[in-house]
Amino acid sequence: MSYDLYLVRAPEGATQDDVAAIALAGAEGELPAGPPPPEAKARQRSVVDALRARNPALEPFAFDYSEIARLQGISESEARQRYRHVELNGPEDGNGIQITLQDDWASVTLPYWHTGAAASAVWDEVWGYLRVLAERGGFTVYDPQLERALDLETDRLAVERVYADGVQATAQAAAEFVAPREAPKRWWKFW
């Protein structure tokens, strides 16, 4: 389970409902047919460069296009078309943040495992990435947990509160899943 933030390039004057609709449609993962517009590819490169300048430990995931093509029964060219997004991940032993950049949509994902001061430090990092995405990519941040676009100047505490609730709920669900359960009495035993 993770806390997800969606980033969209909303048109000027877009309402909260417009931003939500664009964000949720992007989350469905449907790419337009054909190659990406050149300006989208250039923006994607610029944003990736800015994010990696902020944190050089972020590494793009290397897709094996020939293997994708083989497994899906498509050409390698089609695999490159379908999987043209950039996925940035920190080190294996890092904090689990993942950033995905499509043509005009992005996401930042954070696992529900950080608490206390560690959570605050991770949100410092995430907020820095959100600022880069907003400034360099022209993205608006939509939070599906809060069901609204975020104001990066005022909404951090609200996001952190909802995240903390999610961490607690995830920990509780995990504890219930692994807790030993009393075996049910067999119906034929009366004692």
Image (cartoon, rainbow, N blue to C red):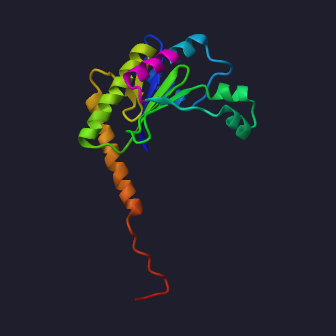
Q: Which residue is drawn at the image coordinates 71% and 40% (left, top)?
A: 71
Whether residue 107 appears in this view of the structure is yes
User: Could you say which is closer to the camera, residue 15 or residue 127?
Assistant: 127
**Magenta extent:** 45-57
Q: Main secondary structure of the magenta part?
A: helix
Q: Which residue is drawn at the image coordinates 27% and 23% (left, top)?
A: 154
- Magenta stretch: includes residue 54: yes
Position of 128 with respect to 87 (left or right) is left
Q: Which residue is drawn at the image coordinates 26% and 31% (left, top)?
A: 157
Name the quadrant of the N terminus: top left
Position of 85 with respect to 144 (left or right) is right
Location of residue 122 (image quadrant) = top left
Location of residue 130 (image quadrant) = top left
Position of 26 with respect to 138 (left or right) is right
Q: Position of residue 132 (x, y in %)?
A: 39, 19
User: Could you say which is closer to the camera, residue 15 or residue 61?
Assistant: 61
Name the quadrant of the C terminus: bottom left
